[in-house]
Amino acid sequence: GSAPAATAQDDEPLDSSVCAACHDDQVAAFTSNPHSLLNDPDWGAAGVEGGSCVSCHAGAAAHVDEGGGEGNIFAFGDDASPAARSQACQECHADTHPRFRGSEHAQAGVTCTTCHQIHQPGHSAVSLLRSGPMTATDPAEAIGAASSVCASCHGDVFARFQWNERHRLQEGILACTSCHDPHERATRARLGGFKQDACMECHTDKGGPFIFEHASARAEGCVACHDPHGSPNRHMLAFQGVAELCFSCHATVPGFHSRFNLDTVCTNCHTSIHGSNFDPFFLK
Amino acid sequence: SAQDDGGSFSGRIVLGFRSVDVDGADRKYREDVNLSDGPRLMDLDLDLTPTGTVRSFVDRIQLDVNDVGASSFETVRLAVDKFGRFGFSYDRWESAYFYEDLILPHELANVRLSSGGDFHHFDFERVRDRAKLDVTLSPRAELNFGFDRFAKRGESTTTLDVSRDEFEVHKPIDEERFEYQAGFQYAWDKVTLIIDERYSEYQNAYSIFLPGFSEGESLPPANLTSLDFFFLDQPYDYESFAHTVRVVARPTRDWIIRASGTLQELSLDLSAAERSQGTLFTGVPFTTDLVGSGGIDRDAELFDLDLTYVINDRFAVIGGFYTRSLDQAGAFTFGGTRNAGAWDIETSGVEAGLEVNLAADLTVSGGMRIESRDVSFSTVEAGSPLADEDESTDHDGFFATLAWRPSRLYGLTLDYETDSFDDPFTLASPTDRSRIRARGQLNLDNGVWGSASFLLTEMENDNSGWDAETQQLLLRAGYRADRFDASLGWSSIELDRFAAFAVPAIPTLPARDYTAESDFIDALLRYRVSDALTLGGELRRYENDGSFALERDDYRLFGEYRQASGLLYRLSYRTIDYAEGAFDFDDYDAEIIDFGVGLSW
């Protein structure tokens, strides 16, 4: 049968010791978990209704009355829609992730519990993340929990970090969440002019501001020239040959450039290619 | 672990030594792998859940330290929590970066491969420290504070164009950024107010110099350029403020309304001094002794309004409106010459979508987005206008996703999106873009799992003929049991990029059809032979048959032996064989041996 409604608004409070009679492992693990606050009466008074397990698992009274079983309690199972599962979490977490419902993850039926495990002991700072599948892409075994979870579904992106030119995800220096917010809508920076903000946290010197900006970088962002996940090419550029990239846009060059060709490295003269305070052509 | 009254204390510490032996191009190894040898703290993990009086103050303390010591990549993480009272975390990472292109005789150099011509050298370290403290004043009120420091220091060289010749010059790297953040959040029953204030400052001690005489590359009599010395100091710093106010309202259970506004102000000061002496290509001596100063101001505004309306159990409507505004102006007077630049970028967009849960296991969503951007910029060089341009780009797009997840055991996701851009800013930016992606997953209860995905991305620019296509196929399978973990994966990525160059000054430029046909194979086998002994091996193979052909084989064998007392020993042997197709200048073989002794409890 279908699961009860996700919300516990009409449920009577139920002490977690009742649940512990059958689910003692999960209740015990809860004490080292941020969600243990649900047992705190102060938080209950502040709008976290139901208390304890019932806050998330609606229909607990019927579940208890019937001596347990499936289908009589909201258990975040396959019988509940992805929206209903996430909605149960959003009862409390809408403030922190109000745009999750419009995210690409939500559109793809990904729910909070796809990535997060709720009952395990855990630290709020790592958001109770599940562990991803073991792969051979982490020889140093340094890949962080966040990236490991992402790799479970985004193996195609993860493969790109095996190119020689890549961000140091495998070494654990960066995580997918260093640049991406999995709870947000991904479409908003296409023309926004702010898409390089995440890049500038580590590549601050490339972001200027400069008197003479490289217009493509300012208007289109770093990805106009670079493949950020990884690339076969030097500096994670779109082409291994620098001139191939530059001439893709710069049709108008001075006549003396006639001695150059696709083997030319434009940035040997145009050294300050990200922007300059001296020269509009980035020569210094 | 020691456990008492719900408390626990578990941990692991492993000290070790890494031996690295590279045969061949050591600098290429440093570019790609860069694991250095020497003693190090391989692992320090502590996890404490206290009991008794201490538990009244702290619920959990976790420390995770990796590869500290003689290592190129170090991470430290500390987290302390008292649930419902405070949460503190501190992260630190250090990362080394190395790049040095090979300088070869012209007849051998080929910049489209990995040899020759890119006269840049980088050897520096990045360090980042981040701390975060959340203080819960009450279930409704929270204060939060953040600190973020980023530093980059080391050596680099670059080139300098002087009188028709290029000179390699030193460019020390010395920059540091600090960010301080404070925020407050208060939740009423239906509305939450969030205020966030950030202040950041950044210093860059930018300088380039050539301390002694250098002859130009081009020889007399065609070119007589030489430099006796060259010094340019251009230190700059900026400070920036960002003020954000965000409101999240849930007037009813069916609505989530989020409104957010951010104002950013940035003010940059720069000064410069240049001294140089040398000979021009004509043979005429020259000297420079210039000073200058200037500044740049930037204001940015971001506003977002997002709506989520849950019509019923099956339907939800998503909508959003946003604007972005960047206004930047700066001027710099150097040696009596004034340069200036100004930018104004205004963007606004609307998104709307519908999410339909046709059944518990089937979700269909789709929507559209419209965006418009106006860019205007102007530059002044030596007091004279150089550029004054206005560009407008309109974008509209459509996206759709079908997710079928009948069970946690398996599922399938299909998504498609297409975008068109009217008059994009560059000739290598797409006028049309599309992406189709299919993913399937299987996770059986018996430990067998698998996944497959296919991705096709197409981008093209109608104005220039530039186009790019990516096809990617991924197949992965594995088996996980109590003592056994195995996986095998194959990914094929085919990149095609075509550019037809229309450069009047160089009519002979041929069109370029660049390909990167990359195959990645990886495998892992880990077997826990007994409670004490774990053995395993893994391989990664990368082969590129495209324009820049190469092969890389990466194998590792590892083992860990743990005594009942908690004493543990680790040994790992890794070998990497890197070979390029066209030349062998960058080929290398590396052997990396890690040995560690530690204790776990």
Image (cartoon, rainbow, N blue to C red):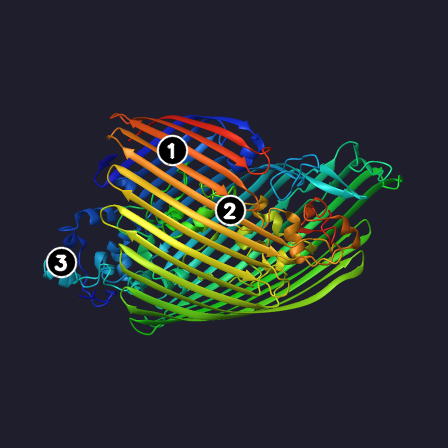
Name the amino acid type tagged 3: Gly
Is disc 1 placed on a helix, strand or loop?
strand
Along the viewing direction, whichever of B597 and B138 lies nearer the viewer: B597
Q: Residues within 10 Å of mark 2 (few under 14, many from 20)?
A: some
Instruction: Say if mark 1 contacts mark 3, CB within 8 Å.
Output: no
Upstream in sequence: badge 2 or badge 1: 1
Q: Where is mark 1, residue-wise?
A: B44
Mark 1, other Cα within 10 Å: few <14 / some 14–19 / many ≥20? many
Q: Which chain carries label 3?
A: A
Element assignment for label 3: loop
Residue B371 occupies which quadrant of the picture? bottom right
Question: Which three-letter amino acid code belongs to the residue tagged 2?
Answer: Asp
B590 w.r.t. A216: above or below = above
Report the residue marked by disc 3: A69
Image marks 3 and 2: residues in contact by CB distance under 8 Å = no
Q: Is residue B204 left or right of residue B309?
A: right
For disc 3, the neighbor class at 10 Å (few under 14, some 14 to 19, many from 20) is few
